[in-house]
Amino acid sequence: MKRPVIGITGNSHLIDGFYPAQTGGLMSINAINRVCDSIGLIIPSIPDNAKVRELMAICDGFLFTGARPNVHPKFYGEKETEKHGSFDMERDELSLSLISACIEEGKPILGVCRGFQEFNVAMGGSLYPEIKDLPGRMNHRMPKEGSLEDKFGHKHSVSLSDGGEFEKIFDSNLIMVNSLHGQGIKDTGEGIVIEGFAPDGTPEALLVEKSPGFAMAVQWHPEWNAENDVISRKLFKAFRDSIKI
């Protein structure tokens, strides 16, 4: 039986701080391979490498991954500041265009962390540069010390909309998730529906209402322990079930 090909957004990276590369996390590849029973294909985030339509012809769906660099504020009409952190402009250009095209055609897409923020910006929304600086917000960033389990383990709950699409996937309106991000949604983009919030009010789960296909994103990292974590597995399986080949 033919397996779907799912494009996984790559990221600009300097190996040993010197050699330029495009990389993808093994957690994401394993989640696509083992939970979705699909072929994970790392997509270089280089707009000149392949046109959006070419990528859509190759892939049956896309996973927009997390990454250390943030979406450049110029893409949502704001000026760059020190709080915005580092950037990967080529990934911005590719991902934002690809998300818009997939939504228009109904190509299944799943966003994670930075991908969650990209969904919102692609639809005309904006971002806060640093969530922890907002009154009443917790620090959502990854712990600086500890093992992968310490960094990616559950950190807080997420309350989901009653009767919403995420509640249907998870069979619950309250779940536990990890937290490894600094930025977050400020103003929601057109057609973006927020269905999940952290205890401090930070948006954590969204869908694109007008998309004819699967277009959902989460602020946490479900790729961590995706085979064993019930919530993560259900999300990736729902994504896979939406892909018709």
Image: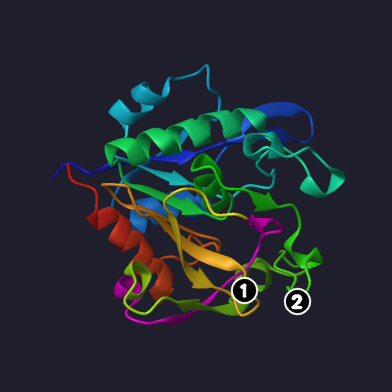
Residue assigned mark 1: 201
**Residue 187 shown left or right of residue 228 in the figure:** right
Total marks in image: 2
Q: Let me know if residue 44 appears in the view.
A: no
Quadrant housing the C terminus: top left
**Magenta stretch: residue 173 in it?**
yes
Label 2 packing within 10 angstroms: few (<14), some (14-19), many (20+): few
Amino acid type, mark 1: Gly
Q: Position of residue 220 (x, y in %)?
A: 55, 64
169 w.r.t. 89: above or below: below
Q: Let me know if residue 193 appears in the view.
A: yes
Q: Give the colour scheme of this rendering.
A: rainbow
Q: Answer with mark 2 or mark 1, whichever residue precedes in sequence.
A: 2
159 w.r.t. 99: above or below: below
The answer to which of 67 and 149 lies nearer the viewer is 67
Q: Judging from the image, what secondary structure is the residue with disc 1 in? A: loop
Q: Residue furthest right?
A: 82
Q: Judging from the image, what secondary structure is the residue with disc 2 in? A: loop
Q: Position of residue 221 (x, y in %)?
A: 54, 62
The answer to which of 225 and 183 lies nearer the viewer is 183
**Residue 6 shown left or right of residue 151 in the figure:** left
Residue assigned mark 2: 136
Amino acid type, mark 2: Gly
Q: Position of residue 123 (x, y in %)?
A: 49, 43
Residue placed at 75% from the left, 76% from the top? 136
**Magenta stretch: residue 34 in it?**
no
Disc 2/disc 1 C-alpha distance (Å): 9 Å
Q: Position of residue 161 (x, y in %)?
A: 41, 76
Res. 182 image quadrant: bottom right
Label 1 packing within 10 angstroms: few (<14), some (14-19), many (20+): few
Q: Please report the bounds of the magenta region as a residue range.
A: 168-186
117 w.r.t. 20: above or below: below
